[in-house]
Amino acid sequence: MTFDLTPEQDQLRDAVRALGRRYGHGYFVEKAKAGEHTTELWAEAGRLGYLGVNIPTEYGGGGGGITELAIVCEELAAAGCPLLLLVVSPAIAATVLNRHGTEEQRKRHLPGLADGSQKIVFAITEPEAGSNFHRLGTVARRDGDDWVLNGRKCYISGVDEAGHVLVVARTEDSGTGKLKPALFLVPTDAVGLTRSKLDMEIVSPENQFLLYLDDVRVPADALLGESLDAGLPALFAGLNPERITVAAMGAGTGRYAIERASEYTATRKVWGGRSIGSHQGVSHPLAHAAVQVELARLMIQKAATLYDAGRDLEAGVSGNMAKYAAGEAAALAVDTAVQVLGGAGMTTEYGVATLLGAVRAGRIAPVSREMILNFVAQHVLGQDKSY
């Protein structure tokens, strides 16, 4: 067992860290508050190869795995730039396409995902279904050689930045008559696809949308994979990378908050000549948060290693645990940073309160802490299903 990164992974971490710090949290917040996107950072990360580290070399990627992409997610977040679309486009969409798309679909989309010139977002969540994807109401039916999609989606990230949406719908099995999931690559300018921006209490340059699909017609090759049988495996293929990279982003955010707070408390002097960080009432909460972040990082490393080794079932357990641990640790770290900075913690200048909404959302999405506890209770502890 080793906890060391390879020399190549170390170089990647250092390079991404340097890129993130050149932009920094001030850039991130400025873009968010102006209603703009982090276009420059995304483009440079793509040009340098960081967005495609997990994409095979034959499609223009770096040939690495989710371990490498998790490094990118964590280090950009640790620089104050937690980019949610890293999770959506390179982690979910690229993984699903690479593992279950047709060769034509891979050739058409993966090179653009690798260099950042293309973004594909993911649409599964629905207003009525929530965490229960078995109740999805979006339906796709055959009409000649085409597919026609109808339904609604909510909390879909980055639709305004993407060329395609990977839509999870349900199709009728001709043999059984039962509905089963299938994934469709739908252009964001498709006729019948409309969107409505959701106002969120999160400081982020990436927007959330409601999507409406009203008789959206797409050609046969919009169906992901060779047949309808690819639907369920493709859907699950994106879940572990999603959890691992979201966790990495949370761990990076926690590191950022602790670093900002530690710099402040080590130099801030109020009572006499000693820094406020010399008081255990200040230093112990920060130390506790640092421990929780480091524990989450270890679970992220384990989950990514298992996933890249092809051990999907084990990676599912570790990925869920990593997501839970990182969500809790990030929320704790940011809240603690605000508290020890006092009034300064609530200012935009000190750059920690701007993350409160995002880390709180990290305990809810893309899977809630309660659903992770359900998963662990059932699949690790052998308990009966409670819902």
Image (cartoon, grey):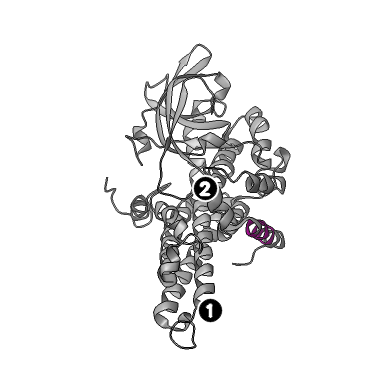
Circle 1 residues within 10 Å: few <14, some 14–19, many ≥20? few
Extreme-top residue of the structure: 144
- The circle on residue 228 is none
Task: Give the labeled residue for mark 1.
Answer: 267
Q: Amino acid at mark 1?
A: Thr
Secondary structure beneath disc 2? Answer: helix
The region drawn magenta spans: 13-21
Question: In the rendered image, which quarter is residue 135 located in?
Answer: top left
The mark nearer the N terminus, 2 or 1, is 2
**In the depicted structure, whether residue 13 falls above or below residue 143:** below
Residue found at x 50% / y 37%:
122
Quadrant in which the N terminus appears:
bottom right
Query: Do tag 2 and tag 1 residues touch (Cβ < 8 Å)?
Result: no
x then y, percent, for residue 71: 60, 57
Q: Secondary structure at mark 1?
A: helix
Horizontal arrangement in the rendering, residue 264 relative to residue 49 (left or right) = left
- Residue 238 visible (yes or no): yes
Magenta stretch: helix, strand or loop mostly: helix
Could you say where residue 86 lies in the image, as x and y percent from the top left? 57, 46
Q: Is residue 299 visible?
A: no
Q: Amino acid at mark 2?
A: Ala
What residue is shown at x 65% (from left), y 63% (from top)?
5
In the displayed structure, would residue 25 be above or below residue 282?
above
Residue occupied by mark 2? 32
Given residues 267 and 108, the one toward you in this image is 267
Q: Residues within 10 Å of mark 2 (few under 14, many from 20)?
A: some
Q: Position of residue 223 (x, y in %)?
A: 53, 25
Residue at the far bottom: name it: 272
